[in-house]
Image (tube, rainbow, N blue to C red):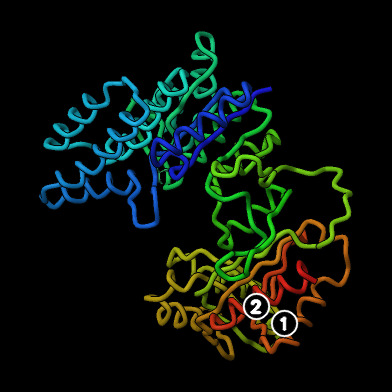
Amino acid sequence: MIKVVKFGGSSLADATQFQKVKQIVSADDARRFVVVSAAGRRHKDDNKITDLLYLCHAHLKYSVNCDPIFQMIEERFLAIKNDLKLSYPIEKDLSYLKSALRKSIPLDYLVSRGEYLTAKLMAEYLGYTFLDAKDFIYFSYDGQIDFVKTKEMMDHHLSAHDHFVIPGFYGAMPDGQVRIMARGGSDITGAIAAKVVDADVYENWTDVSGILMADPRIVDNPKRIDKITYSELRELSYMGANVLHEDAIFPVKEKNIPINIRNTNEPENPGTLIMEYDNDTETCASPITGIAGSKDFTVVAIYKNHMSNEVGIVRRALEVFERYQISIEHIPSGIDSFSIVVNSADIKDKIYDIVAQVKENCRPDKVKVISDIALIATVGRHMSSRPGISGQLFAELGKNDINIRMIAQGSDEINIIVGVENKDFEKTTKVIYNRFVEA
Ligand code: ASP
């Protein structure tokens, strides 16, 4: 049994959190690959090391002294080292970094030091081999992971050692230069490691006990999701549920390696298990797995009589959005109308030009722009086998005086998306939750 375990920033924020990590790792010898983020916030007003590193870089860019910020970084690392009585000479790395700041230092290299130094300390603390991500994770020049080389490198390291601590969030370009991933990228590092070592499970340790069925800022004490498929998670994350970096799903999904979201502060909680459930015949109390959504979408509705007989009108409208590099969320359609739903932030400065060009390209009878729309996705793999769920959902929203402005459903029938006015966003989420989960 091989487990890749990734710990997020809050699980590494100070010596106490390091101790919890050690307890978790040493409780199971299968936990042989430990991927770490950079030390995160100790409390809500604290700073993440990664943010401080970005801030140092911004100061340097504008020739402002960054010593006070760098000092905060030094103090954080030294406190962990001293509290745990470690001997790794981190002072040397920090002073090297400080002098490098006076010259020009690449952003990617600087920012990756958060993970690098956290991993150095953790490797000593656990007694595991430190494996630098730049000697393991390789990008191709197009920015994609070079899985062939990455696997080769891992096999090479495995011929000499078997328990590793790996810094997350970065890898190396073909020329050896450090390149960082998107924010939250340590999740991706964990997924890559899980894929190349053929892990039995990828445990992602964070500060929540799994994925919740709805946003706890909206619904009081929402239930935890025990089991979810990759596709359901993708739908929920895309719509705003924010637990795991979405790019962390693809590497493990291919091999159906389960991802287990766990809480470092509550290790006995089984968390959420993400995997493909082929024979998922279990009868669930609720047909839905979760609800997620976000505000601030714009609907551009295009009306034209006899549109259904006109070939190419949708393409001509979409061409305009493509020209402005705007990605489309949904295209709900009627017989003589269709709507294009986009993120308001993307279209805000271009809306007048876009409408003018749609009018020119499509010669519609009317174009209507509806902004301040929130989209809420109700997601569940069990919905497709139970008729009537969407009817119940729409009826419930109607009963609660919520006006549905748009409806969309993916072809695999695992989601129902409704568009409502921004002001109804929270209410809609609560109504759906109460109808399908608490009922
Ligand atoms: N430290 C990086 C960040 O804050 C990457 C990570 O934590 O996954 O985004």
Task: Check disc 2 and report its element: helix, strand or loop.
Answer: helix
- In this view of the protein, can residue 200 be seen by the observer? yes
Image quadrant containing the C terminus? bottom right
Label 2 is placed on what type of residue? Answer: Thr
Q: Using the image, determine if residue 228 lies above or below residue 138.
A: below
Residue 244 location in percent, x, y? 55, 48
Residue 227 location in percent, x, y? 74, 48
Q: Using the image, determine if residue 254 lies above or below residue 130.
A: below
Q: Are marks 1 and 2 in contact (CB under 8 Å)?
A: yes
- Left or right, residue 253 beside residue 171: right
Q: Residue at x 22, y 30 (%)?
A: 94
Q: Residue at x 72, y 63 (%)?
A: 415
Pointer 2 residue: 428
Q: Using the image, determine if residue 194 lies above or below residue 224.
A: above
- Between marks 1 and 2, how big is the CA–CA gap? 7 Å
Pointer 2 local density, CA inside 10 Å: few below 14, some 14–19, many at least 20: many
Task: Check disc 1 and report its element: helix, strand or loop.
Answer: helix
Of the numbered discs 1 and 2, the one sitting upstream in the chain is 1
Image quadrant containing the N terminus? top right
Pointer 1 local density, CA inside 10 Å: few below 14, some 14–19, many at least 20: many
Q: Quadrant of ligand 1?
A: top left
Question: Which quarter of the figure has residue 433?
Answer: bottom right
**Residue most toward the top?**
160
Pointer 1 residue: 397
Q: Residue at x 58, y 64 (%)?
A: 216
Residue 61 location in percent, x, y? 16, 49
Question: Which quarter of the figure has residue 198?
Answer: top right
Q: Residue at x 44, y 66 (%)?
A: 323
Q: Which residue occupies the foreground of this view, 89 or 110? A: 89
Residue 47 location in percent, x, y? 33, 51
